[in-house]
Amino acid sequence: MDVQRKPEWLKIKANTNDILEMEKLLKVLSLHTVCEGAACPNIGECFKNKTATFMILGENCTRNCRFCQVTKGIVQPLNPEEPENVAKASKQLGLKHIVVTSVTRDDLKDGGAEFFAQTIHHIREYLPHSSVEVLIPDFQGDITALYTVLDAKPDILNHNIETVPELYHEVRPMAAYERSLELLKRVKEYNPHIYTKSGLMVGFGETKQQIQSVMDDLREMDCDILTIGQYLQPSKAHLRVVEYITPEQFDEYRLIGLEKGFKYVASGPLVRSSYNAVEGMNVLSEG
């Protein structure tokens, strides 16, 4: 199926002034956000509300995922001030729920796990009453690196499964479906009090049955939160969109996910793994 144009439900307008204001703050503290790096469609809304998903470990990724717009290339030395700067920015913004992700740094011995831990510790110091969510890479299956992050006790540990296993070779050639499932399983085994979260993109040509099968696999790992959103092709060099999923189908996926036992499911065309993440945290806290 050759998709020519986006449907109306995917057309949004961002307020440039809101984006420029947030970018000034991030520049002062030498910080990056996935909102900018991955060209998130919700950047205008989030920046207007003074929220952002901080992206640590620099801005260049060592992986070659064919869906992602985060830049690839020569990685830079880590900025030792970055973990504390994330905490400073979070406090300046008055955030109640802070989301921290990263590029994948396979060149680092621990994949950047210690930097995640330091960032969590600094946020706890600056904002002791705020919750912390981290969206981590797979650390190439390094369990010690995972435990380094878990020992810092984030409230939510997010690791995106991204797509169905049948499409991994095409969408995520340097990742492994089973390795990602194992990571989520290890979190619960090590500390069952930490919530786990994962996300899926749809529109690559996967079937409804394959999506439901992934839901079953995630629930088998006791995953608490699921996000599902539409894949949007960042450039001609990336994978094309095979199908634009309707809002009605996203609603159906949400209901199916809740029926399968997820505590919270965010499913919609513009949903991303950290979009409106505070709502998911609030639901878990109330439960």
Image: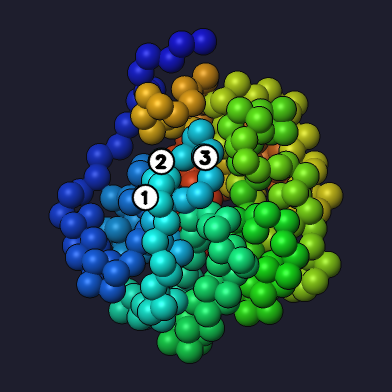
- Three-letter amino acid code at the position of disc 1: Gly
How far apart are the two marked residues, 3 and 2, measured between alpha carbons? 10 Å
Q: Where is residue 196 in the image (x, y as percent from the top left)?
A: 69, 61
In the drawing, what numbered circle is on residue 125?
Answer: none
- Three-letter amino acid code at the position of disc 2: Gln
Q: Where is residue 63 in the image (x, y as percent from the top left)?
A: 53, 45
The C terminus lies in which quarter of the figure? bottom right
Residue 107 falls left or right of residue 142: left
Kindly identify the residue that appears in the image at 84 percent across and 49 percent down. 220
Instruction: Determine the secondary structure under disc 2.
Output: loop
The reply to whether callout 3 and callout 2 are in contact (CB within 8 Å) is no
Alpha-carbon neighbours of circle 3 within 10 Å: few (<14), some, or many (≥20)? some
Q: Name the residue under label 1.
A: 37
The reply to whether callout 2 and callout 1 are in contact (CB within 8 Å) is yes
- Three-letter amino acid code at the position of disc 3: Asn
Q: Position of residue 67 (x, y in %)?
A: 49, 35
Q: Mark 3 points at which residue?
A: 64
Q: Mark 2 points at which residue?
A: 69
Kindly identify the residue that appears in the image at 72 percent across and 27 percent down. 166
Kindly identify the residue that appears in the image at 47 percent across and 81 percent down. 123
Looking at the image, residue 102 lies above or below residue 270:
below
Residue 174 falls left or right of residue 82: right
Q: Which of 245 and 133 is in front in this view?
A: 133
Q: Give the mark nearest the N terminus, 2 or 1.
A: 1
